[in-house]
Image (cartoon, coloured by chain):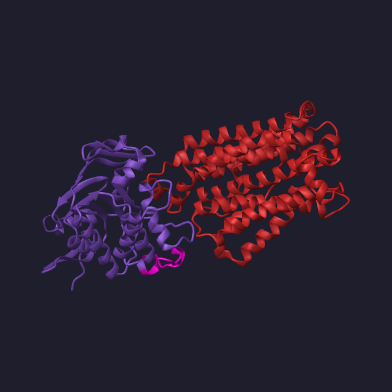
């Protein structure tokens, strides 16, 4: 029932997202532009501007929601979110490095490739650390250290940036946006995200057993090292690919699991599908709002999710402390 | 049947267990006694495959170290001392987790659900089935987690201080449940601090000190005043009645027993 409602919300919001934009298209030309062709301008707007935007909002939202739910389950910590293990900030740093070297203009794929390389590097580091010292707490601390380091490196690049215009471009990208993305971005990110979803979903049973603690989970036949590997790789693929094409979008992975948890039996595995769908719906809604709030100038969706997400999270904490756990 | 030979464990380079030899037979409840830090928990963790060890542990002739995690989880259940439950799961969902090593991708079978219901009944938590575990008292949580371990239906159950924090009636409920499991040809190793409880409900006792097994046998044969003084550092009044041995600690061995 919950999944059906959230799935419906995703569908409706995808449709709304397709209908919203600066170009004044009516419903009929929108639909015909999307599927049939008809008016060429309408076709280009629908198929090459609005469709990739809606698809990216949906799939990146799914990635963030799912990764957030899985990480909270793995770490048994309601404050865990995809940014925590350093994947988002490493991907951002990878992209910023590409900006700095000036390769960003060379190819459409240069920027996402840089971000993916950054995400991959952070994963290799995390896994090496996790392999040496098996504790989950080590993973969190290593993630925090990695986030600080890549954040500092990003600042360094901004500091060294040759001209204010380049800095502006970098900062704007860091804020996260789904504007002016093409179907190429979708085809680049979607396969990686889908693979990440599979890896994350494969950890569901292990996450349930982990509710009882790591010792009890091991005694139930869960191989913790394999579970950590699945989760870190899955998060890196899903969130890294999303960051690569849209920049850093915060708070969705943190807030969504909390929003849907009270409507489930609270088993981590029961939370995965609702969190994924909820993430998709929330990012779609945020992206629609980013286009509508200030009519003259579009907001960056990353700014909007943080602006709404942070106070909302605080309210959630104050209102129902028990529901957090 | 579980057999451990020359079992040694070191943690961060410090030896914790030295050459431990132990066997568990189907149908017996074995009490594991010893002061804090004697190595009881370490022994249970290594027997359940959670800690690397040297030496051999065999299960019906099969090497424990060579088993896959899932196969091992169908043979040995471990009830850790730490009672941490991360989310407000319902009691029934916690007990159902005991079926994890047995289930495939689908929902739990009617047989699984019957096992879960039996385990909840045995631990007297069936009435709490729909309550969130986080709202229960510590003793109730302990019983829920014990029911979880029972629902794993393994030939061997290792329980690390399962009765600590329980009221006297539920301490005996748990020991009686272990006895019933032993009646089904299962073997139970349970670490305890209550000597009287151990002597009454266990077929055999194993006493550990400083990482070694220092005594093993029937309660009446090994639980002497001398041993209590040496191993636990206490003096105790030991009595015998129709139900078995009764231990009443009277003082620390280092001091003189208080004059009555």
Q: Residue placed at 34% from the left, 54% from the top? A: B112
Q: Residue placed at 41% from the left, 68% from the top? A: B137
Residue A263 position, x and y percent, is: 56, 61
The red one among the chains is A
Residue sitting nearer the eye, A86 or B107 = B107
Magenta residues (range): B127-139
Residue sitting nearer the eye, A30 or A137 = A30
Residue B134 covered by magenta stretch: yes
Displayed quadrant of residue A52: top right
Please tell me whether residue B258 is drawn above or below residue A290 in the rendered image: below
Q: Quadrant of the C terminus of chain B?
A: bottom left
Q: Can residue A295 be spotted in the picture?
A: yes
Residue A236 position, x and y percent, is: 60, 38
Outermost residue, bottom direction? B260
Residue A293 covered by magenta stretch: no
Q: Quadrant of the N terminus of chain B?
A: top left
Q: Number of numbered discs present?
A: 0
Instruction: Report whether A271 appears left or right of B40.
Output: right
Q: Can residue B34 be spotted in the picture?
A: no
Instruction: Report whether A51 appears left or right of A8.
Output: right
Instruction: Report whether B91 appears left or right of B21.
Output: right
Q: Residue placed at 27% from the left, 54% from the top? A: B35
Residue sitting nearer the eye, A102 or A42 = A42
Instruction: Report whether B87 appears left or right of B152.
Output: right
The purple one among the chains is B
Residue A299 position, x and y percent, is: 81, 49
């Amino acid at each position: 029932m919950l999944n059906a409602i959230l799935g419906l919300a995703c569908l409706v919001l995808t449709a709304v997202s397709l209908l919203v934009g600066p170009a004044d298209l009516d419903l009929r030309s929108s639909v015909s532009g999307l599927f049939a062709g008809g008016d060429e301008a309408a076709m280009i707007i629908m198929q090459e501007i609005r469709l990739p935007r809606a698809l990216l909002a949906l799939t990146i939202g799914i990635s963030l929601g799912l990764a957030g739910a899985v990480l909270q389950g793995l770490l048994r910590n309601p404050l865990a979110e995809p940014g925590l293990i350093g994947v988002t900030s490493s991907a951002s740093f990878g992209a910023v490095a590409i900006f700095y070297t000036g390769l960003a203009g060379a190819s459409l794929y240069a920027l996402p490739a840089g971000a993916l390389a950054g995400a991959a590097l952070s994963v290799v580091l995390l896994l090496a650390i996790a392999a040496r010292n098996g504790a989950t707490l080590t993973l969190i601390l290593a993630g925090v250290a990695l986030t600080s380091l890549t954040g500092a490196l990003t600042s360094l690049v901004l500091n060294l940036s040759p001209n204010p215009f380049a800095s502006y471009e970098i900062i704007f990208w860091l804020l996260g946006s789904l504007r002016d993305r093409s179907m190429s971005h979708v085809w680049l990110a979607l396969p990686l995200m889908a693979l990440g979803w599979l890896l994350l979903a494969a950890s569901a049973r292990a996450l349930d057993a982990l509710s009882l603690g790591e010792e009890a989970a091991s005694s139930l036949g869960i191989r913790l090292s394999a579970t950590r590997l699945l989760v870190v790789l899955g998060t890196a693929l899903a969130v890294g690919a999303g960051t690569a094409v849209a920049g850093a979008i915060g708070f969705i992975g943190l807030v969504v699991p909390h929003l849907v948890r009270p409507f489930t039996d609270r088993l981590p595995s029961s939370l995965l599908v609702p969190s994924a769908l909820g993430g998709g719906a929330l990012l779609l809604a945020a992206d629609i709002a980013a286009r509508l709030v200030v009519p003259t100038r579009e907001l960056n969706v990353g700014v909007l999710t943080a602006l709404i997400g942070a106070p909302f999270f605080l309210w959630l904490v104050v209102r129902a402390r028990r529901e957090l756990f | 049947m579980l057999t451990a030979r020359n079992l040694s464990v070191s943690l961060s380079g410090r030896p914790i267990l030295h050459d431990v030899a132990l066997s568990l037979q189907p149908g017996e409840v074995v009490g594991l006694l010893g002061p804090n830090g004697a190595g009881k928990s370490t022994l249970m963790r290594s027997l359940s495959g959670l800690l690397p060890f040297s030496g051999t542990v065999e299960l019906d002739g099969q090497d424990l170290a060579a088993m896959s995690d899932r196969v091992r989880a169908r043979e040995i259940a471990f009830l850790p001392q730490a009672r941490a439950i991360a989310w407000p799961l319902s009691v029934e969902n916690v007990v159902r987790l005991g079926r994890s090593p047995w289930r495939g991708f689908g929902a739990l079978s009617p047989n699984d659900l019957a096992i879960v219901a039996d385990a909840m009944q045995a631990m007297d938590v069936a009435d709490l089935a729909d309550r969130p575990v986080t709202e229960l008292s510590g003793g109730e949580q302990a019983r829920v987690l014990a029911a979880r371990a029972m629902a794993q239906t393994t030939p061997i159950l290792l329980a690390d201080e399962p009765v600590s924090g329980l009221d006297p009636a539920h301490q005996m409920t748990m020991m009686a449940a272990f006895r019933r499991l032993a009646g089904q040809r299962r073997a139970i190793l349970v670490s305890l601090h209550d000597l009287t409880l151990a002597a009454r409900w266990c077929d055999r006792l194993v006493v550990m000190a400083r990482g070694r097994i220092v005594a093993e046998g029937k309660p009446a044969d090994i639980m002497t005043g001398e041993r209590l003084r040496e191993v636990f550092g206490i003096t105790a009044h030991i009595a015998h009645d129709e139900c078995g041995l009764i231990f009443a600690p009277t003082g620390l061995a280092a001091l003189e027993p208080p004059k009555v």
